[in-house]
């Protein structure tokens, strides 16, 4: 009876939820999404620089292209940050962090660099963003017990990425 | 002082089930501090208001290690110890839609 009464109150006023949260263990994690997103940030900065270097009149087409590059840079910087947060928070467990005690500082650095590359067009910061995520990828694949290799991405800006050596 | 919450999720099953109500309060902590076995509601950045069971207290620093009863529970095994300051209250009444 008390339960039924509370149900009515909940339906009318909406009681606060206390989440007894479980994660659905889909097990599908891969830092490549973050790595590609970080590469995209570098690519957008390069495209912005190319556009600027052409000089000439600032036409509607110029502003249209520039705003699109900025928009994609924003989106992919945030995407990279979100992907890293999920792997860090959901996949990595205490034993992984014990083996790689630098992980927390590295994730914090990635978050900071991700914000910096949104706020600026600093290519050097974008390169650091890619490399920090590469280091995170090395930790991730080590946690999975899979060796890695470094190879240049087969598309501009052709930066070196960490890949699982499958 | 008192708060009625509705449980959402299954990490404390079979005792606490999705849809159950709980009355929580901080008053019990005036009589004795939080201890292992307490069911507590707490706020966790990124996850919001959660409810878990206290498994143990850190010998130093006052950290509280909270767990669910299910293996895929998102708890201190994922986000680490919580601070006693994050605790909203201890469950003092469990109202469930079934005969115990």
Image (tube, coloured by chain):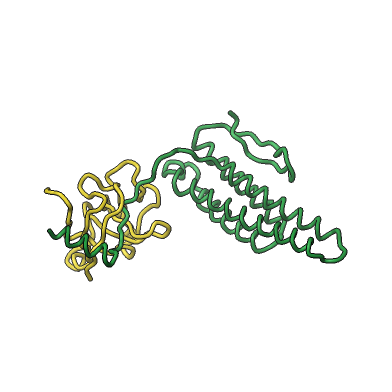
Chain colours: A green, B yellow
Is A97 positioned to the left or the right of A148 in the image?
A: left
- Give above or below for B77 relative to A75: above
- Give above or below for B55 relative to A139: below
Residue occupying the far top of the picture: A166
Q: Judge by depth and name the residue closer to the eye, A32 or B57.
A: A32
Q: How many labels does the image show?
A: 0
Residue A16 position in % (x across, y down): 30, 63
Please name the residue shown 29% across and 43% down the image.
Answer: B70
Is A25 positioned to the left or the right of B28 in the image?
A: right
Please name the residue shown 26% across and 50% down the image.
Answer: B18
Q: In which quarter of the image is residue A13?
A: bottom left
Which image quadrant: the C terminus of chain A? top right
- Give above or below for A66 relative to B30: above
Residue A22 position in % (x across, y down): 35, 47
Please name the residue shown 42% across and 41% down the image.
Answer: A95
Residue A52 position in % (x across, y down): 81, 60
Which image quadrant: the N terminus of chain A? bottom left
Please name the residue shown 48% across and 41% down the image.
Answer: A99
Residue A50 position in % (x across, y down): 81, 55
């Amino acid at each position: 009876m008390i339960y039924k009464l509370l149900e009515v109150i909940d339906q009318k006023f909406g009681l606060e939820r206390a989440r007894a949260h479980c994660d659905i263990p889909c097990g599908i994690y891969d830092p490549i999404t973050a790595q590609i997103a970080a590469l995209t940030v570098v690519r957008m900065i390069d495209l912005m620089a190319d556009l600027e270097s052409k000089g000439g009149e600032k036409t509607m087409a110029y502003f249209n292209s520039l705003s699109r590059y900025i928009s994609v840079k924003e989106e992919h910087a945030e995407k990279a940050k979100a992907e890293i947060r999920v792997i860090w928070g959901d996949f990595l467990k205490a034993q992984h962090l014990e083996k790689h005690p630098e992980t927390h500082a590295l994730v914090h650095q990635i978050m900071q660099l991700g914000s910096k590359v949104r706020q600026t067009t600093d290519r050097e910061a974008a390169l650091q963003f890619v490399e920090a995520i590469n280091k995170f990828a090395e930790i991730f694949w080590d946690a999975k017990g899979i060796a890695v290799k470094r190879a240049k991405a087969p598309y501009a800006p052709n930066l070196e990425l960490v890949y699982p050596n499958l | 002082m008192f708060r009625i919450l509705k449980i959402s999720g299954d990490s404390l099953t079979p005792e606490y089930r999705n849809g159950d109500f709980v009355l929580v309060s901080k008053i019990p902590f005036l009589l004795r501090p939080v201890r292992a076995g307490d069911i507590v509601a707490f706020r966790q950045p990124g996850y919001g208001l959660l409810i878990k069971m206290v498994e143990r207290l850190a010998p130093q620093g006052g950290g509280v290690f909270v767990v669910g009863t299910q293996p895929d529970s998102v708890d201190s095994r994922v986000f680490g110890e919580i601070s006693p300051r994050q605790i909203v209250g201890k469950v003092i009444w469990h109202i469930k839609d079934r005969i115990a």
